Image (cartoon, helix red, strand yellow):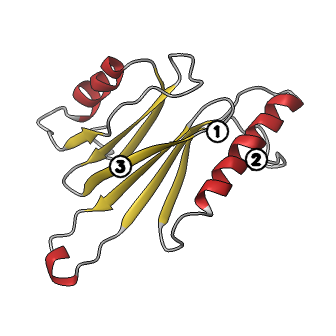
Amino acid sequence: MQYLKPDIFVGCEIQTKAGADSILTRSLNVFGATNYQMAPFIYSNGGGGSLNNALFYNSDKLIYLRQKPILTSSRDINHYTLMVKDPNIAQHRDTIFIEVHMAHLKAGNSSANAAERATQTQVFRNYVETKPLMRNHIFCGDLNVYSSNEQCY
């Protein structure tokens, strides 16, 4: 991480807030770095207690605004909104928003698993279609997609 220095870093299958805090303090804010922050940690619906998502960001460049779970039948997709930290925002009153969607789609090779992934991504598409058009979206996570022929792809 010291070499990569990501501005946005996401993780899934994080069991507890203590685990997320450990990533922040033992992997990101190390070797003198103190600029990484974490979005508020929330436990995911359907996560079984251990399949939670977390978002970390470079607070020198980004401002965390909010998060909202996108409810699906098996696991939530976390929607985080970040804003680019612009020193000239007072003059031009405009900024760039980044919408990060963190998903952990259903694993497995069966047709039922593939159908569940398709349902999860359709819920996501329906959600995104209700949002402002001129936004920057990142869809990331443990997608468990086994082929580009899958309906969810």
Tag 1's secondary structure?
loop
Eye-nearest disc, 1 or 3: 3
Tag 2's secondary structure?
loop
Give the residue displayed 76% in from the left and 47% down from the top. Answer: 152
Say what amino acid the circle numbered 3 marks.
Arg
Say what amino acid the circle numbered 2 marks.
Cys
Q: Mark 1 points at which residue?
A: 143
Location of residue 138 in the rendering, given as x and y in whole percent from the top left corner: 51, 55
Location of residue 74 in the rendering, given as x and y in whole percent from the top left corner: 67, 29
Mark 1 and mark 3: Cα distance apart in space: 23 Å
Q: In which quarter of the image is the N terminus?
A: top left
Q: Mark 3 points at which residue?
A: 66
Q: How crowded is mark 1: few (under 14 residues within 10 Å), some or many (20 or more)?
A: some
Numbered label attached to residue 152: 2
The reply to whether discs 3 and 2 touch (Cβ–Cβ < 8 Å) is no
The reply to whether discs 2 and 1 touch (Cβ–Cβ < 8 Å) is yes
Say if residue 101 shows up in the picture.
Answer: yes
Q: Is residue 23 above or below residue 129?
A: above
Q: Is residue 43 above or below residue 147?
A: above
Give the residue displayed 62% in from the left and 63% down from the top. Answer: 129
